């Protein structure tokens, strides 16, 4: 059974699996539908994704607009990242606030990001292999994003600005206050 705890952001959860170690190595359940539903909620994941990135890469802050909104369960298989979820639900008591959790191959933590949150991560190690489950299929026409370096968000990415590596697309997202599309609290998902 996975040990789960909510963060200071309602609905965002950190999952720490129970790891069994012996002379051969280790074993843990990386996902159990029944445990997930018992501790976090009923979610049906339909797509798994994986990326490999080098030190300084920042991916995000991304989301999918309805009807293709996505909740994600993310983890690191190799290396380490700072994973960030930003509440972009207008009217939410935590609107514009974020949760940042270090996910590493050593701590084996996972982060659950519900619909209505922008998501991103930065690579803190030489390289990282990042995996995530989504509860809806990716749709290029439903892409949305906010600027990773929006000063109003106050995210400490824990890497020097001159070492940040971005895709061309991630260089041009609007700040949260200028975003043309956001979720509504209690709806729009």
Image: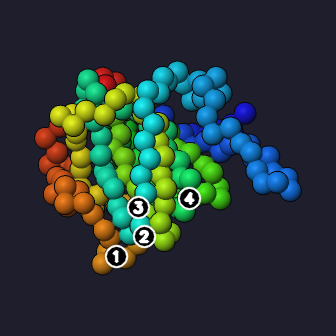
Question: Circles 4 and 3: CB distance less than 8 Å?
Answer: no
Q: Secondary structure at mark 3?
A: strand
Q: Position of residue 82 (x, y in %)?
A: 47, 59
Residue at 36%, 32% (x, y): give it.
70
According to the picture, the residue beneath numbered tag 3 turns out to be 53
Label 4 neighbourhood size at 10 Å, few (<14), some (14-19), many (20+)? some
Q: Secondary structure at mark 4?
A: strand
Q: Secondary structure at mark 2?
A: loop
According to the picture, the residue beneath numbered tag 4 turns out to be 78
Would residue 113 be found to the left or right of residue 188 on screen?
Answer: right
State the separation of the CA atoms marked 4 and 3: 10 Å
State the separation of the CA atoms marked 1 and 2: 8 Å
State the separation of the CA atoms marked 2 and 4: 12 Å
Question: Circles 3 and 2: CB distance less than 8 Å?
Answer: no
According to the picture, the residue beneath numbered tag 1 turns out to be 163
Mark closer to the observer (3, 1)? 3
According to the picture, the residue beneath numbered tag 2 turns out to be 55
Q: How many marks?
A: 4
Question: Circles 4 and 1: CB distance less than 8 Å?
Answer: no
Q: Secondary structure at mark 1?
A: helix
State the separation of the CA atoms marked 3 and 1: 13 Å
Q: Is residue 142 visible?
A: yes
Q: Position of residue 125 (x, y in %)?
A: 50, 69
Q: Earlier in the sequence, mark 4 or mark 3?
A: 3
Residue at 17%, 52% (x, y): give it.
174
Q: Earlier in the sequence, mark 2 or mark 4?
A: 2
Would residue 181 be found to the left or right of residue 64 on screen?
Answer: left
The quarter in which the N terminus is drawn is top right
Residue at 24%, 46% (x, y): give it.
145
Residue 159 against residue 44 in the figure, above or below? below
Q: Earlier in the sequence, mark 1 or mark 2?
A: 2
């Amino acid at each position: 059974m996975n040990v789960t705890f909510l963060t200071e952001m309602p609905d965002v959860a950190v999952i720490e699996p129970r790891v069994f170690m012996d002379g051969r190595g280790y074993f843990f359940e990386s996902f159990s539908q029944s445990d997930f539903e018992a501790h976090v909620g009923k979610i049906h994941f339909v797509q798994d994704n994986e990326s490999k990135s080098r030190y300084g890469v920042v991916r995000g802050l991304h989301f999918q607009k309805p009807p293709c909104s996505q909740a994600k369960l993310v983890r690191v298989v190799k290396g380490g990242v700072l994973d960030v979820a930003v509440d972009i639900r207008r009217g939410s008591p935590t609107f514009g606030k974020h949760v940042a959790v270090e996910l590493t191959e050593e701590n084996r933590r996972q982060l659950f990001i519900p619909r209505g949150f922008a998501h991103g991560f930065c690579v803190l190690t030489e390289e990282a292999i990042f995996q995530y489950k989504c509860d809806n299929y990716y749709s290029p026409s439903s892409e949305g994003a906010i600027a990773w370096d929006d000063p109003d968000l106050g995210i400490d990415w824990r890497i020097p600005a001159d070492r940040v590596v971005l895709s061309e697309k991630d260089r041009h997202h609007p700040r949260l206050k200028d975003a043309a599309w956001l979720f509504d609290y209690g709806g729009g998902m």
